[in-house]
Image (cartoon, helix red, strand yellow):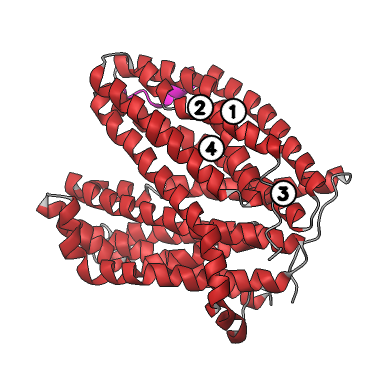
Amino acid sequence: MDSSPPLISLNDKRAFRRAVIFLSLPVAAQMLLQSMLGMADVIMVGDLGSTAIAAVGLAAKIHFLLLVLMSGLATGCSILIAQYSGARDFASCQQTLAVTLFVGTLVMLPLTLAFGFASNTWVSWINPDPEVTKLAAQFLIITAPVLLLTQWIVIYEASLRALGSTTMPLIAGVIAALINILINYALINGNWGFPALGVAGAAWGTLIARVFQLLIIVGWVYGKKHGFGLSVAQIKKGLDKVQIHRYLAFSLPLVANYAIWAVGNSTYHLVTGYAGTEALAVMGVIVPIESAFFALFVGLANASAVLIGRELGAGNNETAWHLHKFFDRITFMLLVLFCAALWFARPWVLMIFDQLDAKSTELLFSTLGVFCLLVSVKIINMMRIIGVLRAGGDNRFTLITDTIVMWVFGLPIYIAVVFLTKISFVYIYALMFFEDVLKFIPVIRRIGSRKWMNNLTQR
């Protein structure tokens, strides 16, 4: 069954706007859901004390770093599928999914075994506290199968989104989140007559929720007789050495890019801890606000990548160029709207976080102002890199650019300022956007050169 969506004409403005909305909003909603759910286990074990919080937090960070690796593999899959769908070559879409599932399984299987059978050994290498190590290892052992489950979920979600099917992954994510929270409530503290398992209860909640999420997605795909309900013969095509090599050559720069970004982003927040208690308190408030703010634009970038990728795969370069210009305009308009709204809403934000002391409150007010003024540069770069350059498979350029601006300029300067100066955190926070300022012109020039307009379906 061919599940490739029809190409949408820019002249049909109503259909085009509907496509953008239906592609972007479910992804934005799922990003918001993930940003809130990411801390659910940590929050719900809060009654067990600081050791339990530290253990679950450590396990969550490890899972996040591996999720970045999974996302790199899945993104490579989605870009190829978007282009193949534009070329009306659904058989190659199916083969790309099969190859990605095979590679993803091959990557995650040894890690799953390491989590399931050796966590008691290697977790002590990254945390010296024996109690934290014991609880974190307990969590990781129970959730070891989650690595494989999540890899398959992320690949299916990315593949379906590349075809424009975004609502079903959102529904599956919402159901999984509710299951996770309910099981956490039942098993962490022993509610509703269930045993009180503590940290282990949170782990079982995570595992069972992921099982249901995968079952919902796969059940929908096969129940609807969707083209991604692969037969055994189609799955075997994922073992083709030529296709595996081609997929890896395309996707590995993406995986590296994601990993470098994740480590760099973690380093920024780690170094911020040395900027003082008030800085940490302010970042604790800013991070969820940033996550919520970025969610919509990640959804918009996903819509851009899918629609532009389809046109490039179909050989419609001029339409792809006009799509890039359209998404540039809508991004700018939304940024003006949201930044202005947050600027004037700052007093209400302070009221929500009224538990902060006076000095931290004043610092938060100023830092939010810096965010409103500078976040546009980061968002525009994100839209152009994720939504335009990656749609054409320009992975090598984005990897080199991101690596140089972050690790040669951005992080070294940020670390030097934090450790060698005593300036206000408002200025230190502004430096987090310095690398985006440096990246802005190279990204514009790259897009203007049109070198990213690659038809990846031509072998």
Numbered badge on residue 438: 2
Q: Which residue is mark 1?
A: 441
Q: Secondary structure at mark 4?
A: helix
Q: Residue at x 60, y 32 (%)?
A: 380
Foreground mark, 4 or 1? 1
Q: Position of residue 227 (x, y in %)?
A: 69, 74
Looking at the figure, which quarter contains the N terminus? bottom right
Residues at marks 2 and 3, CA–CA distance in whole angstroms: 25 Å
Q: Quadrant of the C terminus?
A: bottom right
- Quick check: marks 4 and 3 in contact, CB under 8 Å? no
Indicate the secondary structure of the residue bearing disc 3. Answer: helix
Q: Is residue 324 left or right of residue 440?
A: right
Name the magenta segment's main secondary structure: helix
Three-letter code, disc 1: Ile
Mark 2, Cα crowd under 10 Å, few <14 / some 14-19 / many 20+, is: some
Q: Residues within 10 Å of mark 4 (few under 14, many from 20)?
A: some
> Is the residue 364 above or below the residue 161 in the image?
above
Task: Give the residue at x 49% y 74%.
Answer: 102
Horizontal relation, residue 316 to residue 341: left or right: right
Residue pictured at 53% horizontal, 79% vertical: 239
- Disc 2 versus disc 3: nearer the observer: 2
Query: Quick one: label 4 or label 1, which is nearer the N terminus?
Result: 4
Quarter of the image holding residue 274?
top left
Percent position (x, y) of residue 222?
A: 63, 77
N-term mark: 4 or 3: 4
**Which label number is shown at residue 294?**
4
- Looking at the picture, which amino acid does disc 3 mark? Ile
Q: Earlier in the sequence, mark 2 or mark 3?
A: 3
Residue tagged 3: 308
Amino acid at circle 4: Phe
Residue 433 appears in view? no
